[in-house]
Amino acid sequence: MLPSAPLHRLDLPWLEQADIDVAILRLDLIDPLISGNKWFKLKHHLRAAEHAGAEGVISLGGAHSNHLHALAAAGRRFHFSTVGLLRGHPIETATVKDLQAFGMELHWLGYAGYRARHDADFWTPWRERYPQLYPVPEGGGGLDGALGCAEIVSQARSQLGKAGWDDYHGWWLACGTGTTLAGLVLAESQTRRLYGAMAVPEGHGVAENIQQILGSVNPERYELIAASRGGFARTDPALMAFIAECEEQSGVPFEPLYTGKALLALRQAIEAGRFAKGSRLIFVHTGGLQGNRR
């Protein structure tokens, strides 16, 4: 059974000034290692691996990947093998050190090799090398990942009273692969709009991934907003200063690669008049605080 994430009002001066109510769903608090939306994205993939009789899983990510970090931690906790295919060339980060400590076997693909992950034959040599492992898409994506994330909606709805609400108008969250957003769209009513702040460059395939998962679902139910700040995993002084200020004012920790970028994109949208006064939004804290370490 998935842990429950607390929901509470997000108190920030710029929200109060705009007369916009935001409640934050603290997925970062559900587990110290398998944190944020990763519990939800992995649930159905791990169940499928078990049903397939696999001895473990193999997946992809970068040197700061929250997905690989959660997957490796799950492998150590629940005693199954994990293999990670990493973007770029060998580099030592706090995340990589954890992956190794958790027992994940690592392969560095370079940049060209990682870009080939969408090719039809990408998995063929890896299936041959690790026939006992179950392949999980980048970021825990695909329909299985989205179906797990659909449960996030019921967790939030069951706690609306904690925010003093009886209803809300939409969702705001960071997008890395778009899988979590797709899951929320599948579970949410057609009257509520979903906004995904893309924390990765537009060419990273977020829109295509969401469309593939949702199929014929009306694309007008959600909107993608560019929020990468100029590149994958890129930060800048203005972003870092904004995060530090919001952390001090709200008491909520954020990280710069996903939740911080999403929160700044929300402030910019509010300042641009995208939301009427009195609007109520649920902001999803997708975790990833382990990525604050370098």
Image (cartoon, rainbow, N blue to C red):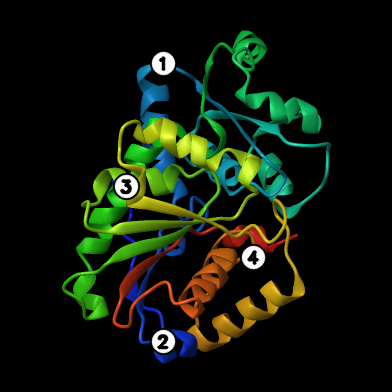
Q: Is residue 210 above or below residue 120?
A: below
Give me the residue at 67% from left, 63% from top. Answer: 292
Q: Amino acid at mark 1?
A: Gly
Q: Amino acid at mark 4?
A: Pro
Q: Point out the tag, 1 or 2, that comes first from the N-terminus.
A: 2
Give me the residue at 56% from left, 82% from top. Answer: 246
Q: Position of residue 167 (x, y in %)?
A: 19, 70
**Picture disc at residue 18:** 2
Q: Amino acid at mark 2?
A: Ala
Point out the frontmost of discs 4 and 2.
2
Q: Which residue is mark 1?
A: 53
Q: Point out the tag, 4 or 2, that comes first from the N-terminus.
A: 2
Q: Is residue 213 above or below residue 32?
A: above
Point out the frontmost of discs 4 and 3.
3
Mark 1 Cα shell of 10 Å, populated few (<14), some (14-19), many (≥20): few
Q: Point out the tag, 4 or 3, that comes first from the N-terminus.
A: 3
Q: Amino acid at mark 3?
A: Val
SS at mark 2 in the image: helix
Quarter location, residue 89? top right
Q: Which residue is mark 4?
A: 256
Give me the residue at 52% from left, 70% from top. Answer: 263
Q: Is residue 18 above or below residue 95?
A: below
Q: Which residue is mark 3?
A: 185
